[in-house]
Image (cartoon, grey):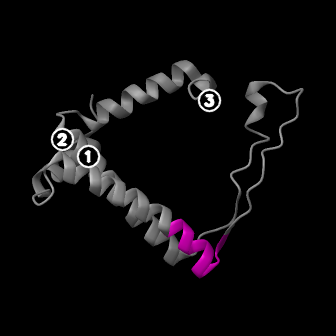
């Protein structure tokens, strides 16, 4: 059974996307939404200061299994987003979802089916899914 919420969301996007129906518009709007998401993270660090990014080379002991590796990997983010930054981030991620659904519509793809296939692939391949 298909996920009703995902299908409803994709149908609603199809109904309300009027100005940017061209694949070129959808591609550029999705890219813009991604950039705005990155900008929201940047502003949370540089303007608000509610989170910090402290990146360095990942330090992984050589004698651990691949399963244990995730326990040694860092996301390089410290702190928690404040309510304002969290709301902005949610809005920007929502815009990304909107344009992802729009792109799926352009190519007559069901977003839930794409999600389901990706989930099955991840479940089957596990940690080997992203080997690079």
**The disc label shown at residue 83, or none:** none
Instruction: Give the total number of marks visible in the rendering.
Output: 3
Residue 101: numbered disc = 1
Residue at the spot 30% in from the left edge and 35% down from the top edge: 112
- Helix, strand or loop status at disc 2: helix
Callouts 3 and 2 close, C-beta under 8 Å = no
Q: What stretch of residues is rendered in magenta?
A: 40-51
Tell me the quarter of the image containing the C terminus.
Answer: top right
The mark nearer the N terminus, 3 or 2, is 2
User: Which element type, helix, strand or loop, lies under badge 1?
Assistant: helix
Residue at mark 1 to residue at mark 2: CA–CA distance: 6 Å
**Cβ atoms at labels 1 and 2 below 8 Å apart:** yes
Q: Residue at x 33, y 31 (%)?
A: 114
Tell me if label 3 and label 1 are in contact, CB under 8 Å.
no
Mark number, residue 132: 3
Point out the tag, 3 or 1, that comes first from the N-terminus.
Answer: 1
The residue closer to the viewer here, 118 or 43, is 43
Q: On screen, 78 above or below 61?
A: below
- Which is in the foreground here, disc 3 or disc 2? 3
24 sits to left or right of 37: left
Q: Is residue 50 left or right of residue 108?
A: right
């Amino acid at each position: 059974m298909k996920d009703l919420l995902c299908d409803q969301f994709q149908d609603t996007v199809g109904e309300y996307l009027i100005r940017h129906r061209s694949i070129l518009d959808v591609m550029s709007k999705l890219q813009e939404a991604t950039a705005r998401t990155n900008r929201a993270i940047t502003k949370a660090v540089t303007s608000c200061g509610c989170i910090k990014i402290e990146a360095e080379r990942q330090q992984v002991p050589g004698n651990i299994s691949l399963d244990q590796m995730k326990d040694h990997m860092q996301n390089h983010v410290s702190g928690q987003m404040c309510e304002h930054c969290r709301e902005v981030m949610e809005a920007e991620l929502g815009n990304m979802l909107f344009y992802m659904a729009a792109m799926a519509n352009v190519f007559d793809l069901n977003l839930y089916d794409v999600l389901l296939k990706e989930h099955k692939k991840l479940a089957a391949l596990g940690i080997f899914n992203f080997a690079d």
